[in-house]
Image (tube, rainbow, N blue to C red):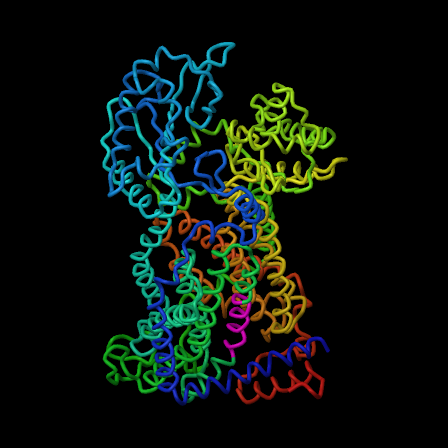
Amino acid sequence: MEKCKTDCIERPLSLAFEKFGCAVGRHPCVFLLLALFVAAALGAGFIFLHEREANDIEDQFTPVNGPAKLEREIVVENFPQSEEFSELRLASEGTYASLIITGLQGENILNEAAFNDIIELDRQVKSISTGNTFEKLCAKSKGNCMSNAILDIINYSATEIVSSSIKYPINNYTFLGTTIGGVELKPDSSEINSAKAIRLFYFLDEKKTIGSSDWLDGFLKLLSNYTEQKTVHVSYFTSISRQNEFETNSDSVIPLFSVTYFLAITISIMSCLRLDCVRTKVWVATFGVVSAGMAVLASFGLLLFCGMPFAMTVATAPFLILGIGVDDMFIMISCWQKTEVNKAVEIRLAETYKEAGVSITITTLTDVLAFYIGLMTPFRSVQSFCVYTSTALLFCYIFNITFFGACLALNGRREKGHRHWLTCMKVPEATGDDGGCCVGGAYDKNTLKEFEMPVDLFFKNYYGPFLTRVWVKTLVCLIYAGYLAVSIYGCFQMQEGLDLKHLAADGSYVGSYYDKEDEFFSAFGPNVMLVIKDEDFQYWNPTARDSLDLCLESFQNLPVADSGISPVSWLSEYMQYGKNASLSLNSETQFKSHLTAFLNQSGFSQDVNFTNNQIHASRMFIQTVDIRTAIDEKNMLAVFRETAENCGKLQTPVDLIVYHPAFIYFDQYAVIISNTIQNLVVATCAMLVISLLLIPNPLCSLWVTFAIASVIVGVAGFMALWDVSLDSVSMINLVICIGFSVDFSAHISYAFVSSEKSSANEKATDAINKLGYPIIQGAVSTIAGVVVLAAAKSYIFRTFFKIMFLVILFGAIHGIVFIPVFLTFLSTCSSSREKNKPNHSEPSDKSEQRVKAVVIQNVWCSDPDCP
């Protein structure tokens, strides 16, 4: 009964495709022109491309509702930007330019010659004028531009750098951890003996946006043309650099698309090429690629019309669609070649649609559903990619069964008339399978079908029988065990998170700056803000203060915190102030009455939101150390938030949040794994449901699901071994895994179940014979679609290539090696109709075969309601 139910879905669908194929075969020009009109009309949406571009890094590559974004809102609300600039208290990264200066040979930078160059460079930077000078645009404190501490220490005199005694990391209450890098201290001392890098910052007033942007452009122009000095090397960066470089990434792949299109057409033509001048499928292959291009044009245009944001990750989609789009074309061509050549074109096309329709519908449904499930991710870049790609796949499917089907019908009419593929002139009919430029139209007189391609014969006569031998099956199982072991090992080596420097192109000055920063300035991490947001917290109550001190101590004792640097705490300073002034600050009245005067005198006025005689919020700061890798960032964020949560569970609760502008990007670590697993599980379950509905055997549908899981594990493991991290970019590709692993395994499983052969080995050989070459064609064409991205200068596009290569490679290997072998172990995958089938030779008479098929169907599906 279960088989009947699945067959009742599959058979009516096949019949519907048969009727539709007949309609396309009768009126090909109508379907062809209609498809062209739709593509052209929707393609007009590209006029909105520029205004739909969404390339803001924070918006696209950080979780939509990440905790740090909510925490930033609290900080901005309670501590509005002050006229007095303080880098420590910024709620954002700020507007700035920065230099990292190192010695040419990696030697000690603290020498007179190097500082002569540094001071001269500082002078040139401050002299930049773009309508506004640095003096007018700079961020100020106490009426003066923010200066660089190291230059203040030597009083802008290079000769003093040798004689000055500089302590590290705190020198006269000034923190130098972000200013001097690669430090070596004198024995048993906090004095610097040598250093390898100096970093200078030039902060601008964030309110002067237009003037600041022009000045930063002038800074980049100056440094890009900067001639190396004799003693130092300079790396440079600005607060707009990362965004600017990211936006130019897509420009690098536009020329590659024409190369991809050429490759796709060439490979399609070569794989469909015959020496027979009538039977060759040159134009069919070409228009199959055109059909995929039309799908990109129509789908993208439609979504641009609808106002859908166009993230840069979407720029990889056309490469993928071009590869995927021709896969179904190969399936349809393969089915067309198995129809009898003497039948009418509409009947041949009807049989082609009946044979291929369900198969390409399964793969399209699974691919589209996999991508739509990707909308569940909290990353807008992933959401945008999934919407555009899934819609393009739908249009690929629509244009395949309309536009491409019409091209197949028109090509069939040409073949029917024995016309040359290029000149359309009639040529004499060939008598054998050799063909040529003067004769053509040869076919097998016994089967009345086109001669099989040499590759098809290889799969039928050699590869299929070879794969079903016992010792080969054993070897395949051993290879699979090794593949699985390496994959699982790789999964445990996976790194998380998107390194921001990867958003810039290779060789960019941004990457150079980040490399120097990682090398010399990783000893100290962010200075984390602790915000007490409880308006009812009683700062004057000794018990409450003890609880707060205990909380601060727990932060200070964390491995990622610097126990040698005391927290920046306004409350500790206020209590010391009260003690020195003999004030009693243990009463609310006394505490609040002296607070304003203290804040104004001490420079802590930005750390307490004290309005209407009420402390609405206050903040303190903890210095972190040794934050060198993505794992360090992830662990630091997790342990700080956990400690903050524990502070809220003390006897006198301290309700606080932790914040730093970098946490906006660190939030990806908190959700990337859980969301990836969630998407994969949901998508896999959805694939299982579709397979159960459309593949007429539940157990074989489970094998399709197994193939999905197997390919996902393989891709995840090998991508980690290929230095690809799990981030919002690679998450996209893991979602793609599901669709592609279904594509290959579903085709083979469906062909295996549908085969009328008697034994499991024969079924596997028959399935490989039917689909081995189309799978190879599809795999090669898809890899050709993305292979040019390997030459891209962008991490995003190279990552896309790497994972797509793994997806296609493992998917194809599962489709033509692993799954056929594993299916032979399941005799239950042989339909019950085979068990009732008499064991005699195939009937030679076609009418007898059709009668037998009817009887078989009646035996298989005894339900009277089943069509």
Indicate whether residue 608 is drawn in magenta. no
Question: In screen coordinates, is 428 left or right of 569?
Answer: left
Depicted 787 relative to depicted 389: above or below? above
Q: Main secondary structure of the magenta part?
A: helix
Q: Which residue is more in the foreground, 184 or 71?
A: 71
Indicate whether residue 366 is drawn in magenta. yes
Depicted 27 relative to depicted 260: above or below? below
Q: Quadrant of residue 667?
A: top right
Q: Which residue is more in the foreground, 583 or 61?
A: 583
Location of residue 864 in the rendering, given as x and y in whole percent from the top left corner: 71, 88
Location of residue 811 in the rendering, given as x and y in whole percent from the top left corner: 52, 58
Determine the residue positioned at 46% across, 19% down.
171
Depicted 100 relative to depicted 132: above or below? above
Determine the residue positioned at 41% across, 82% down.
445
Which stretch appears magenta? 355-368
Q: Quadrant of residue 38?
A: bottom left
Q: Which residue is more in the foreground, 196 or 139?
A: 139
Determine the residue positioned at 43% across, 56% down.
313
Location of residue 439 in the rendering, given as x and y in whole percent from the top left corner: 27, 80
Question: In screen coordinates, is 202 left or right of 553?
Answer: left
Residue 866 visible? The answer is yes
